[in-house]
Image (cartoon, helix red, strand yellow):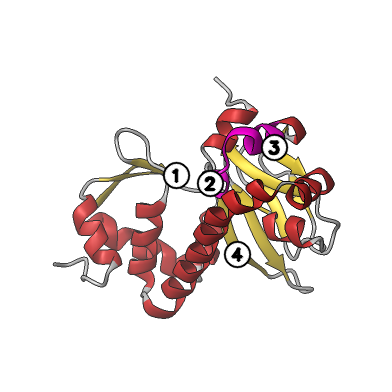
Amino acid sequence: MSLNVAEILHSCRFFSEVQDTAFERLLRIARIAEFKSGALIFRENQECPGVYAVGSGLIRVFKAATRGKEHTLHLVGPGDTFAEVAAIGGFPVPANAEAVADSRCVLLPREPFRRALEEDHLLCLQMIAGFSYWVQHLVGLMGDVVLRDAVGRLARFLLNSQADATGTVELPSLKRHLASHLNLTSETFSRTLRRLLDAGVIAQSESSLVRIVNREKLRLIAEGLSPRV
């Protein structure tokens, strides 16, 4: 069953502390936005449509060079948001966004959302926690690139991904998007995934489905333990 606006916003960490009348105001301006896999949501430097909260599916936020080379900045799944900084700051979107799976999102249109922030101080205060989460997320990404090797980055990504009751994580259908997000080549990503499989900490039933078999050992690998141990 598809999630409705309230369910998506309630599950979103960016709005996790917004309550009561402030939350009701967000509900009044929000609407559902659905995207088929491969759909381009916006291009870099376009006017920001507003804040998107992902209920299901997966969104890729990426930069593209003039020669066609792309780099994935974020893979945004359920419970997370994108375009929030541009919406709040009132400037064009700094990157491109596309759906890499059929996705159901909530859109808080830019102008009504900015007006709500200007008029509702309680809403602003309650959203500070969401900003704190976003800063923490960015610091974590920087730490992954600078301090963790390839296997550590992939282990951390799997640990932080939404898993089902069996511990299964669904990877993007195009592995190069995930490789780019982790600042790895496609070849290095494939070798790294194989190392985790050989170590027995994960299992793979299908190309895009990975089950976490030993979460504690995967956590240690994310912190620097060799997969051979």
Q: Amino acid at mark 2?
A: Ser
Rounded to the nearest angstrom, the CA distance separating label 3 from label 1 is 35 Å
Label 4: which secondary element? strand
- The percent coordinates of residue 224 (x first, y second) are 26, 72
Residue depth check, mark 3 versus mark 4: number of the one nearer the observer? 3
Tag on residue 208?
A: 1
Residue depth check, mark 3 versus mark 2: number of the one nearer the observer? 3
Q: Are marks 3 and 1 in contact (CB under 8 Å)?
A: no
- The percent coordinates of residue 93 (x first, y second) are 77, 61
Q: Amino acid at mark 4?
A: Leu
Q: Are marks 1 and 4 in contact (CB under 8 Å)?
A: no
The residue beneath circle 3 is 26
Residue range of the region highlighted in magenta in the rendering: 13-27
Quarter of the image holding residue 163?
Answer: top left
Q: Which of the marked residues, 1 or 2, is nearer the chain's N terminus?
A: 2
Q: Which of the marked residues, 2 or 4, is nearer the chain's N terminus?
A: 4
Rounded to the nearest angstrom, the CA distance separating label 1 from label 2 is 6 Å
Rounded to the nearest angstrom, the CA distance separating label 2 from label 4 is 17 Å
Rounded to the nearest angstrom, the CA distance separating label 1 from label 4 is 20 Å
Q: Which of the marked residues, 1 or 4, is nearer the chain's N terminus?
A: 4
Label 1: which secondary element? loop
Q: Are marks 1 and 2 in contact (CB under 8 Å)?
A: yes
Rounded to the nearest angstrom, the CA distance separating label 3 from label 2 is 33 Å
Instruction: Work out whether residue 184 can be spotted.
Output: no
Q: Which of the marked residues, 3 or 2, is nearer the chain's N terminus?
A: 3
Q: Amino acid at mark 3?
A: Leu
The residue beneath circle 4 is 73
Q: Which of the marked residues, 3 or 1, is nearer the chain's N terminus?
A: 3
The residue beneath circle 2 is 173
